[in-house]
Image (cartoon, rainbow, N blue to C red):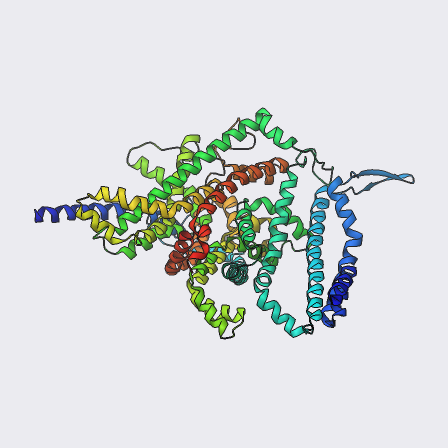
Amino acid sequence: MNRHRSTAAVLSVLWMGLGQLYNRQFVKGLLLIAFEAAALLYFIPNLGKAVWGIITLGEKTQGLEKVGKIMVSVEGDHSIYLLISGLITIFIFAVVLVAYILNIRDAYHTGSLRDNGIAAAGLRSSWANMTDRHFPYLMLSVPALGVLFLTIMPIIFMILLAFTNYSSPNHIPPESLVDWVGFQTFRDLLTLKTWSSTFVGVLTWTIIWAVIATVTTYFGGMIVALLVEAKGVRFKKFWRTIFIIPYAIPQLISLLVMKNLFNGQFGPINQYLSYFGLGKLPWLTDPTWAKVTVIIVNMWIGIPVSMVLIMGILTAIPKDLYEAADVDGASGFQKFKIITLPFVLFATAPILIMQFAGNINNFNVIFLLTNGDPVNGSYQYAGSTDLLVTWLYKLTLNNSKYNMSSAIGIIIFVIVASLSIWSYRRSRSYKEEDMIQ
Amino acid sequence: MKTGNKASTAIRLTVIYIILAIIAICAIYPALWVLMSSLRPGTSLAGSSLIPDQITIGHYIELFTNQSFQYGMWYINTLKVATLTMIFSTLLITLSMYALSRFRFRGRKATLTTMLVLGMFPGFMSMIAIFIVLLQLNLLDTHAALILVYSAGSVLGGFVVKGFYDTIPRSLDEAARIDGATHLQVFIKIMLPLSRPMLTYVSLTTFTGAWVDFIFARLVLRSKENWTLAVGMWDLVNNFQNSNFTLFAAGAVLIAVPITLLFVLLQRFLVQGLTSGASKG
């Protein structure tokens, strides 16, 4: 009885599409046969080289070689290209493997339908079946491919870099080769005095910054929202529009403008200060003041978002809670403390954590406003206001310390990811996802 | 008793209005200042007053006529990149998030968690790898590369959209399915019209993202005539900020104005997008 299903499956194992031909799905079968032929044409010359490339990262150094009597320069292996093209080949191989397995399953499935006396579906009804039962997979396949090659592959590449010695001045292809070094980079980062003191310093400031930045924007936003929504205040829409402007201006622009506003010599803020007879302040040039400045500017940028969020929640608080409190003779402050604050905090707890995580990675504010400066002499390639991310950027693009920046990236990722996953799992939308319907 | 109450309310309101006014001044002062600076004759940062004695649009004209910038060209490039990115991203995001919100299939929770985790990596950490991939695909210095990378990356930020679809009652599409509509028909005829605020939100954010990115664009676009505004702006800042501040201000105004106007005009959708993303965590 199960003749068809096993024959079809075995045929599809032998060569993609044979099982489908056996099941009389000719177009599908021929397409699959062509697909496997193309895949083999690609993999036979490439797959072995890919594995070799990833394992060895190249063996031949660029240099001069004697050919006959003259010296000619020969190209060496480029370790980084080898690593990336190896990764790409392996990813494509995985995709083809998935297709291969699906092809066997399909042949088996169609075969068992035929065993039960149902004719194999023609091309048109196969397609209909695909858009109906497999709709989500179909819709997700295109973005999934994009994410696989443009996000996941680069991230794996980056993670692998942390375990190599890819850094200037001694290991930059094509002049020289890169090698696997295991956990040496992490060891250097944590134990070599110059690196570890920078790392600890930058990490401490990153955390202080993230806490202060989150708290100031959150409570700043709450205060503004409460003021606008206060009883008796008119033109609420007008106020909201004005307060949303800092959010509407692209950060690239507003931060560069701020940099000039706070310019120590000519900036208008210092001009006003001296106009009122006060001394000029070193907004961006003194380490401590620079930290204050980035936090102030970040409030300007971040408060509107919190304001909008909290306004939305304020309108959702049931009015009878306040009426009941009025009956009990609660003062305005008591009402805020007992009703408004807990309600808002409860509703926004997940965002608060996401904002904290976002601030750890807040590249724009630091990079555009201070670029990590003022310089800190005791740091390796970092300034006083550098966060881990901006330090990482400098290490990669200015100093070519790729392995070190990858190691730092992994550490940032571990911090941020554990925070976000923790908050996401706690959020109501994850737990009660299907209960709203 | 009653009059005292009235008086205290009046005082309270006055105090609130004063605070609101101060915050409002802080909120718009930087924008106003850069606008005024761009209209001021001369080149220096130091201006005596906020409102210039004389007004000139010379700096704007210079941006478009000076040979060392190709502002008009950059504007067209940016419009092209941002518009196409917006179209592709919106298409990808809405379709994939609809699938993730509506269907219960194997690997769904894993997909959601993966999306969340991938979004946690600092974006430019993958830049070196993408750069080499683009080099091998011969896509460096093209706008296609930018559009491709922006659109593919945008899907990871689609949680807000998924949250939005979660709130649309499922009975709506079930009814249509019973009437024989395919999934795609349900999506186009029922979901899309309902998700207009979300579509606006997504298109706006993806458009802005492409409009202002200078980090990745600067890496990919090598020749000056291919630059986008943000890259050109970055160059302007590095070369002219100290010597020609007013020119920088004019460039800044031109980049910021379209985005700011869009945001303010569409703020209703923006607020809806932000809050629906929030309450869904």
Q: Which x, y percent locates residue A408?
A: 57, 36
Query: Is B102 drawn above or below residue A429 in the view shown?
Result: below
Residue A14 occupies which quadrant of the picture?
A: bottom right
**Tag count in the figure?**
0
* Residue A400 vs residue A198, the one in the foreground: A198
State left or right for residue A367 relative to residue A78: left
Identify the residue shown where x is 35% and y is 44%.
A345
| Residue farthest along the top direction in this orientation | A193
Identify the residue shown where x is 59% and y is 41%.
A397
- Image quadrant holding the C terminus of chain A, namely bottom left
> Is residue B46 something that shows in the picture?
no
* Residue A429 vs residue B52, the one in the foreground: A429
State left or right for residue A185 relative to residue A202: right
Q: Which x, y percent locates residue B278?
A: 41, 51
Q: Which x, y percent locates residue A265?
A: 40, 36
* Residue B196 vs residue B216, the one in the foreground: B196
- Image quadrant holding the N terminus of chain A, namely bottom right
Query: Is A432 drawn above or below residue A178 in the view shown?
Result: below
| Residue farthest along the front direction in this orientation | A1
Residue A70 occupies which quadrant of the picture?
A: top right
> Is residue A168 something that shows in the picture?
yes
State left or right for residue A66 relative to residue B223: right
| Residue farthest along the right direction in this orientation | A68
